[in-house]
Amino acid sequence: MEASKTNHKHFIIFKPYGYLSQFSSNDSKQQSKKFLGSLYDFPEGIMAIGRLDEASEGLLLLTTNGKMSARINSQKVKKEYYAQVDGLVSDEAIEQLKTGVEITVEGAVFKTKPCTVFKLDAIPDLPKRAKKIRDDRHGPTSWLSITLKEGKFRQVRKMTSAVGFPTLRLVRVRVGGISVNTMQAGDVVEVDVFEVSRSN
């Protein structure tokens, strides 16, 4: 458990599709983008602990405590994602993902560390996405649970593409012991502590 300081604020949010994991930008090219600040009146000094790219959704922790942010990131807390991939995923591809695949990160080849991967038996109960995923007329899809400690840029998407099954939808559903549960896209919950110590 991460202890809370009374003068700091902590939030759990469900980042919707199409939002950047930041609160504002001076980049003129990003002025038309959606930012987290439009979801809630967050306090000054708020920061995201880790990021989700614009097309990804799900659990995101926010805090005003920089030391807590660094501590949670440094603990290599496990993060679980549900990934909808293009095609009927093979057992061979799942085994490759489990043992590690080569992806490119900032121009360098990087091999992912062993992680937990399995195929979901049913479509997960997730909030409807703002932008529709293509339907079955364009071919079948599969849902995977992927749990890892790493957090390279667009890592899960690069991993599934590396084994021949590009990601169509990506939702982070758990960070340590914190899960999305029944949260809906755009939900914001203020908490006293981040219970991220769960190791599995």
Image (spheres, grey):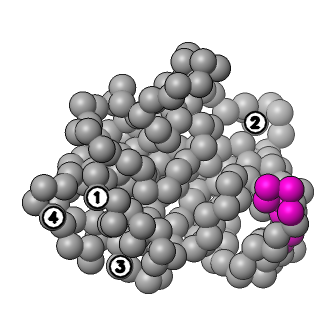
Q: How far apart are marks 1 and 4 (CA)?
A: 8 Å
Q: Which amino acid does label 1 sit on?
A: Asn
**SS state under label 3:** loop
Q: Position of residue 41 (x, y in %)?
A: 24, 31
**SS state under label 4:** loop
Q: Does the magenta stretch include residue 106?
A: yes
Marks 1 and 3: CB-CB under 8 Å?
no
Marks 2 and 4: CB-CB under 8 Å?
no
Residue extent of the magenta highlight:
101-108
Count of labels shown? Answer: 4
Q: What residue type is labelled 2?
A: Asp
Residues packed near mark 2 inside 10 Å, few (<14), some (14 to 19) or many (20 plus): few
Q: Nearer the viewer, mark 1 or mark 3?
A: 1
Q: Residue at x 66, y 78 (%)?
A: 115
Q: Which quadrant holds residue 15?
A: top left
Dot 1 or dot 4: first in sequence order is 4
Marks 2 and 1: CB-CB under 8 Å?
no
Q: Which quadrant holds residue 69?
A: bottom left
- In this rendered view, identify the residue nearer to me: 183 or 56: 56
Q: Residue at x 32, y 66 (%)?
A: 68
**SS state under label 2:** helix
Q: What residue type is labelled 3?
A: Ser
Q: Nearer the viewer, mark 2 or mark 3?
A: 3
Q: What residue type is labelled 4?
A: Lys
- The residue indicated by pointer 4 is 5
- The residue indicated by pointer 2 is 136
Vertical relation: 36 (above or below) 150? above
Q: Is residue 154 visible?
A: yes
Q: How far apart are marks 2 and 3 (CA)?
A: 39 Å
- The residue indicated by pointer 1 is 65
